[in-house]
Amino acid sequence: MKSLSFLFAWVLPSLLLSAQQPPATVIDETAGRDLAAKLRALTPAARTESAGLLKIRDREGRTRTVPVHCLVVPGATDWRVIYETAPTPDQGGEKLVIIHHTNAPNEYLHARAEKPGGTLGEPQPVSRERLSTPLARSDFSLLDLGLDFFHWPTQRLYKPLRPEMRMTRPCDLLESIRPNPPAGSYARVKSWLDKETGGPIAAEAFGADGKLLKEFSIKGLTKVEGRWELEEMEIRDVIKKSRTRLEFEFPEAVAK
């Protein structure tokens, strides 16, 4: 009886504790692929144009500002986002064209003037291996601006007992995985998607070694003519210890 009492004293509380634990998070690849497909299928309803600033802060705390113009162009079979950065005293202007497809990889065209007064030239196709190229020496790569990871082959939706929260908002957590990434690029990206708007409000990018490389967050949204438009977002490079904030301006006359 003594040994039986000893068994109940140790095993029964352990069993009760296990019964009280919440079930483990379910990871659903089918639902993840479906969600990524829905994100790729989202297309802009109308042409939009906005001006903004890239505010780049290096690891020493020095800040430089690059004006940027953004144009969104809907199309019948695809849609485009065109970024143009103005020349600054220490670098030439750049132009990036991202062509979004629903069920095909994004296309990227990029041009950079060699010096502040240099000719920009026509944007040229960018290979997949060069998508880590930064725009205007900022922390935003071409891949970041194109949300290219939603096209990767493995998409896993996390289904926890309670909704994931970011910026006090309930979110879906989608993990995108890329096999055999180019050296120094992302192997995995975790995206927190706002349950109301469906858009990403935070993301974390990891290298092939599992180390965190970058953190991305939406700092502000505004409603323009009934649509939610990005007002401000920030990306932090964990390795370089730098960060870039992209701020857009919308005319007060159309903001609602």
Image: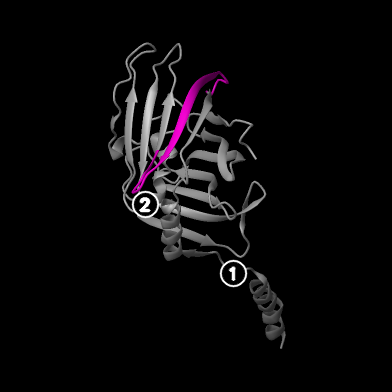
Q: Residues within 10 Å of mark 2 (few under 14, many from 20)?
A: some
Q: How is the image coloured?
A: one colour
Q: Which mark is residue 136?
A: none
In the displayed structure, does residue 160 sit left or right of residue 32?
right
What is the x, y in percent for residue 255?
63, 37
Asked if residue 71 is positioned above or below residue 59 in the image, the reply reads below
**Residue designated by label 2:** 102
In the displayed image of the protein, which residue is found farthest to the front? 253
In front of the other: 238 or 107: 107
Q: Which residues are magenta?
A: 58-80
What is the x, y in percent for residue 184?
37, 37
What is the x, y in percent for residue 98?
37, 38
**Residue designated by label 1:** 23
Q: Amino acid at mark 1?
A: Pro
Q: Residue at x 40, y 47 (%)?
A: 149
Q: Is residue 187 visible?
A: no
Q: Is residue 124 visible?
A: yes
Q: Amino acid at mark 2?
A: Thr
In the displayed structure, does residue 60 sit left or right of residue 126?
right
Q: Residues within 10 Å of mark 1 (few under 14, many from 20)?
A: few
Q: Residue at x 56, y 40 (%)?
A: 229
Does the stretch in magenta take in 147? no
Overall secondary structure of the magenta stretch? strand
Element under label 1? loop
Q: Residue at x 43, y 16 (%)?
A: 87
Q: Nearer the viewer, mark 2 or mark 1?
A: 2
> Decide: marks 2, 1 in contact (CB < 8 A)?
no
Q: Residue at x 53, y 25 (%)?
A: 53
What is the x, y in percent for residue 27?
48, 63
